[in-house]
Amino acid sequence: MFNPKTFLAYSSPRENYPGLNDVSTQLLDIYVVGTNCYGELGLGSLTKKSELSRPVLNSKLDVLSTGVIYIAVGGVHSAALTHDNRILTWGVNDEGALGRDTKQDDNDDTQNGGNSSDEESDEDEVDLNLKEATPLPVDSSFFPSGTVFTQLAASDSATFGLTTEGLVYGWGTFRGENGGIGFSPKGKEEQRTPILIPAIKDIISIVAGAQHILALSSNGSVFGWGCDEQNQLGRRRATRHNAKSHHLIPDLCAVPSGIRTIGVGLYHSFAIHKTGTVYGWGSNNFGQTGVSSAAGLRDAIVAYPDKVPGLQTHGTITSVFGGKDHSIALTETGKCLVWGRIDNKALGIPLEEMSKSYVIYDEYGRPRILKEPYLLSGFGEDPVDFATAGSDHSFVITRSGKAYSWGFNTQSQAGQPGIDEVEKPTLVKSKYVDGKKLVAAAGGGQFSIIVGVSDHSRKKKSSKK
């Protein structure tokens, strides 16, 4: 999951269009790693392998032929925005998250028969629907003429696009613990083609959790919609007498006006006020909101946005994002802070380095929760410019353009071969990313995408000087 504002800052310069939002003109290289059982890596016919343990360059998203400028990663699918305003999607389309028809015809050559583009050892091979495994465009006729997109967001089963005019389009569905809950109150359970999201305008940023969306408006208000079973929307619940507050219709979150940045975990949410105050809400069984009350209880939630006190002493926070049970924040001076669940190694801090006063133990005396934001180390004098969390793993990108990862890695989603759990931040290595200028990363369920500044873009920029 990307922080759109942070990501755009590192992919400048940007092109101005009439309206609220700028479009990046920085061309990007896309590196993929992890499971590919359902075409999550977007490599199409390039490989038959079910998993790649080191990042490889996705030549299906080649900078010269495709020109990606923005990317969004969901649970089992992804979407990319190109320089010529196409939205490409790939991965699982069972619930319409790709926004296009991927049904296989009887006479289609839809089985993966290509050669591998990497140097991995022999692994289990999979047969893929190439209409899903290959990045292909969403039909632009669903959008009014002149529509220009600037950002994308992807949940576990839906995709959204933000336009320069501040409008949001979406497709797919939302799911709850007991199955599908639909895309809109009066619509179909699955919205398989793009539609305009009603009730919001003047939006400047969108982010997606597992099953919910937050949108930040130009006046500093935050709207949320989707599944609200863990109170991740931070707003008044719908009732029979209050139809306008239906959870599938965007409505205001209960945060003060003046919000400048938003972020999400899978089932929790964050907002940063212009004063620097950080608010968290939603699922909190591992203290992942940063609000320690009720942390450790099985069904703990923070029902409405509450201040995250532990971040106030670390300087100005520029971004906050979360995984399933942990969270990560970045300061303007390049410091990285983590908190939440301990036992899945998603924090990147060995237990012996944690202050015992910050640790919550379970009834058997086992350390379970780091309840206060804790400074992450391991990057030397290289400040952190980008930080994000996957489900149970995390990435940071340093100012020198290096990627570090840690956490759950059983399907190579952290890009560290041969290690099931990566305890400390570890440099991501492969012949594709070594020496490249990396700027961002995002973790899906069991796969990840790392983004770099294209050498072609840098040469083009140098030639103008």
Image (cartoon, rainbow, N blue to C red):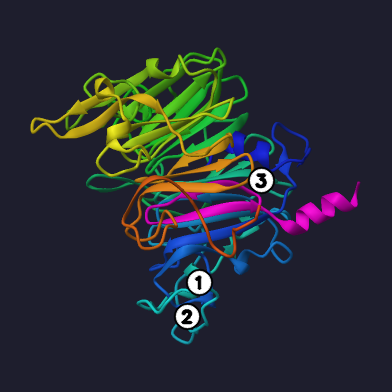
Q: Does the CB distance between marks 2 and 1 fall below 8 Å?
A: yes
Mark 1, Cα crowd under 10 Å, few <14 / some 14-19 / many 20+, is: many
Instruction: Give above or below for 183 relative to 243.
Output: below
User: Which residue is the site of mark 1?
Assistant: 131
Left/right placement of residue 184 relative to residue 293 reads right
Mark 2 secondary-structure assignment: loop
The tag on residue 159 is none
Mark 1 touching mark 3, by CB under 8 A?
no
Disc 3 is placed on an element classified as strand
Q: Using residue 128 as the reference point, say whether residue 12 is left or right of it.
A: right
Q: Mark 2 points at which residue?
A: 110
Q: Which quadrant holds residue 281?
A: top left
Give the number of the disc on residue 149.
Answer: 3
How many numbered marks have been drawn onto this rendered protein structure? 3
Q: Position of residue 310 (x, y in %)?
A: 39, 18
Residue at horizontal 56%, vertical 43%? 397
Q: Which of marks 1 and 3 is nearer the N terminus?
A: 1
Residue depicted at 49% across the width and 76% down the height: 47
Give whichever of 338, 50 is nearer the camera.
338
Please state which amino acid type lies under the numbered disc 3.
Answer: Phe
Residue 213 relative to residue 409: left or right:
right
Q: Is residue 141 left or right of residue 79?
A: right
Magenta-drawn segment: 437-465
**What is the secondary structure assignment of the residue under circle 1?**
helix
Query: Which amino acid type is marked by label 2?
Result: Thr
In the rendered image, residue 285, in percent from the top left (x then y), is placed at 23, 31
Q: In this view, does 223 lie above or below 345?
A: above
* Residue 37 visible from this viewpoint: yes
